[in-house]
């Protein structure tokens, strides 16, 4: 991945790994840049409009104190965005879930998308909103299938 000439329009995500204490990682998405700061810290950059999944986990003396998963769409100049921790300048939030059992449900939904033969970063953004809404109220998300994906591709081509 390129680390030079990174555009200021990239959405940058700070990742960290401190064994048994803090983990921040990308579950899916394709960074276009990466800078390693040291063995534990790196920053990845996403092109405008790219969709990616960011997972944050932190432990305390007695176990997990924070687990959060977000599916985000990278900042595009001229469009609204939300400030999100460790993401600069910010991103559009498609899904934002906290709590380990709910994070697990989202990870299972991502696995299901991949089992269906789809790259999670290329599925309909509305699907991630659907997953977040369903998981937040304790319902299982619907399966992402070929018909839903085909509808997304047609809709995207009409508004492109």
Image (cartoon, rainbow, N blue to C red):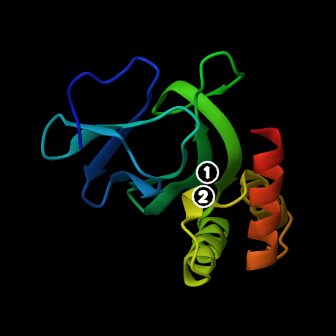
Residue 47 position within the rendered picture, expressed as x and y whole percent measured from the top left:
47, 35
Q: Residues within 10 Å of mark 1 (few under 14, many from 20)?
A: many
Note whether residue 142 is visible.
Answer: no
Res 80 quadrant in image:
top right
Q: Position of residue 44 (x, y in %)?
A: 34, 39
Measure how far apart labels 1 and 2 are at the Cα level. 12 Å
Question: Is 37 drawn above or below residue 100 in the view shown?
Answer: above
Residue 28 x/y as whole percent = 47, 59
Does residue 77 appear in this view?
A: yes
Query: In front: 142, or 133?
Result: 142
Return the residue found at the far left: 39
Q: Which residue is found at the position 56% from the left and 84% from the top?
A: 115
Q: Nearer the viewer, mark 1 or mark 2?
A: 2
Q: 125 or 13, which is in the foreground?
A: 125
Name the N-terminal-most of marks 1 and 2: 1
Vertically, is 83 above or below 52?
above
Residue at the image point whose x is 60% and y is 77% from the top: 108
Which image quadrant: the N terminus? top left
- Residue that badge 2 annotates: 122
Q: Residue furthest bottom?
A: 115
Tell me whether the residue at label 1 lies in contact with that at label 2, contact meaning CB atoms closer than 8 angstroms: no
Q: From the viewer's perspective, tell me whether residue 4 is left or right of residue 159.
A: left
Q: Secondary structure at mark 1?
A: strand
Q: Could you say which quadrant of the image residue 141 lies in?
A: bottom right
Q: Secondary structure at mark 2?
A: helix
Horizontal relation, residue 48 to residue 33: left or right: right
The numbered disc on residue 114 is none
- Binning the other alpha carbons within 10 Å of mark 2 as few (below 14), some (14 to 19) or many (20 upward) gives some
List the residue tagged with mark 1: 71
Task: State the quadrant of the C terminus.
Answer: top right
Q: Residue at x 68, y 49 (%)?
A: 96
75 to the left or right of 27: right
């Amino acid at each position: 991945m390129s680390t030079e000439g990174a555009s200021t329009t990239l959405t940058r995500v700070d990742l960290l790994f401190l064994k048994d204490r803090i983990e921040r990682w990308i579950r899916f998405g394709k960074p276009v840049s990466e800078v390693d700061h040291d063995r534990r810290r790196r920053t990845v950059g996403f092109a405008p409009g790219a969709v990616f999944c960011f997972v944050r986990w932190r432990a305390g003396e007695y176990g997990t104190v924070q687990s959060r998963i977000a599916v985000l769409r990278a900042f595009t100049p001229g469009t609204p965005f939300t400030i999100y921790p460790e993401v600069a300048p910010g991103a559009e939030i498609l899904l934002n879930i906290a709590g380990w059992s709910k994070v697990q449900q989202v990870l299972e939904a991502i696995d299901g998308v991949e089992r269906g033969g789809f790259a999670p970063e290329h599925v309909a953004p509305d699907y991630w909103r659907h997953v977040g809404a369903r998981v937040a109220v304790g319902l299982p998300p619907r399966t992402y299938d070929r018909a839903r994906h085909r509808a997304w591709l047609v809709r995207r081509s009409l508004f492109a």
